[in-house]
Image: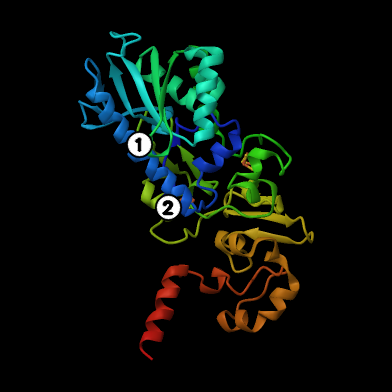
Amino acid sequence: MESDRPYLGMSGIGHPCLRKHWHDFRWCSEQAWEAATLYRFDDGHRSEDIMAERLRLVDGIELRTLDPATGRQIGFSDHGGHFRGHADGIVRGLRQAPRAPHIWEHKCVNEAKFRKLIKLIEERGEKRALDAWDNTYYVQGQLYMHYSGLKRHYLTCATPGTRDVTSVRTNYSSDAAWTHIERAGRVIQAGTPPERVSDDSSFWLCKWCHHAELCHGDRVARVNCRTCLHSTPVTDGRQDGTWRCEKLRRDLPVEVQRKSGCDQRPCPHHRFISQLVPFAEVQDASAEDNWVEYRNKSDDRLFANGSGDLQHTSLDIQRGGKLITDEWLAEVKKPLADASSTSARSQHNLSIPWSDAANAGTSWLTQLGQDQASDNAK
Ligand code: SF4
Ligand code: SF4
């Protein structure tokens, strides 16, 4: 599984669902890739290298794939460094416009999609084909032109194995670029999930979306700094993609965000952004004591996201889901819970057997490590 991207990508912002972008940016859901998908990614990377080699063989073509100032990919950044993209290259010397430098992007697609592009070029002409073919690629190209200051884009497209190749040039559109820069800003600045592309879980984009169970169902988001109501992406005066914890009043390096901060897993101060607990509704909250009370929509019982004896950590809620208030489960597991803690049980049946409350003051991983160490001694 790939690590979550620390930034919102220019390559994907053309996707129509703002909520998907927000969920991605906030690392809300695991994404497991099938092997076939990983092979396709790999084929795409190889195809890009092959295409770059072929372009360089053409007389008069000059292709740069690295930024000479940094020796790294040609990159662009905005919104405090939270919105980023990396172009495949800049090409000059094309037969159609020999002096004009173009942003170069390469895509490797299946045969059907390849044929569709050929048809659109025939029907609409080269300059209007990309927009009609794939809006996400079109927007990506517009943003790279915008941030580089170049006015032309050159997309090469190949079938798997780079056997068949075509190309399409596109002009810069300031309107298209600004529309999506503004959309990216809305995603980054939003403290709660933006609107869905559809309220119908059977809508085709939702059926393919890895956030669907969180968005349309009962699955709780993952526990990390970005799903915590105390975190904020900093956009004023900095360009390094900084996140800040308002609870601990400190900046959060990416690795700390992944560990949910505080050098503990999970951070004891984590409290969910309430919309990321979809099976419940907020009833009350205390900023001073750092707890949020919810009503479970499935049984009307109350429970709290907090760190006191009578409250649930975020990890409890993430693992327990809507069973967090289930009386029967709590009763069945009661002997285990009692063995772990002598503290009074909650009026809301707050303690479940895998609750970290039983290990108050000790992180879950630390406890696991202690259990393993004691087993190893046997
Ligand atoms: S499930 Fe649908 S509405 Fe929800 S984030 Fe995904 S695409 Fe958007
Ligand atoms: S309270 Fe903990 S989990 Fe929340 S943002 Fe701060 S460090 Fe991260």
Front residue of 310 and 208: 208
> Does the numbered disc 1 mark a residue whose Cβ is under 8 Å from ligand 1?
no
Q: In this view, does 220 lie to the left or right of 10?
A: right
What is the quadrant of residue 68 in the picture?
A: top left
Three-letter amino acid code at the position of disc 2: Arg
Image location of residue 302, percent across then percent down: 73, 60
How many angstroms separate mark 2 from mark 1 (CA)?
32 Å
Compared with 100, 376 (above or below) is below
Q: How many labels does the image show?
A: 2
- Tell me the number on the disc at residue 85: none
Q: Ligand 1 quadrant?
A: top right
Residue beneath disc 1: 47
Residue that mark 2 sits on: 258
- Indicate the position of residue 64 as horizontal and vertical percent values: 25, 24
Can residue 274 be seen here?
no
Q: How crowded is mark 2: few (under 14 residues within 10 Å), some or many (20 or more)?
A: some
- Residue depicted at 50% across the width and 56% down the height: 269
Q: Residue at x 79, y 61 (%)?
A: 299
Label 1, secondary structure: give it: helix
Residue 116 x, y percent position in the rendering: 54, 26
Within 10 Å of disc 1 (Cα), the crowding (few <14, some 14-19, many 20+) is many
Q: Return the residue nearer the eye: 163 or 271.
A: 163
Q: Residue at x 21, y 30 (%)?
A: 70
Residue 233 appears left or right of 60: right
The N terminus lies in quadrant: bottom left
Q: Which amino acid does label 1 sit on?
A: Ser
Instruction: Work out which residue is located at the far front of the displayed protein and give it.
Output: 163
**Of residues 36 and 255, the one drawn nearer to the viewer in this rendering:** 36
Quadrant occupied by the C terminus:
bottom left
On the image, the x and y values in percent for residue 194 come to 62, 35
Q: Looking at mark 2, is its residue's CB closer than 8 Å to ligand 2?
A: no
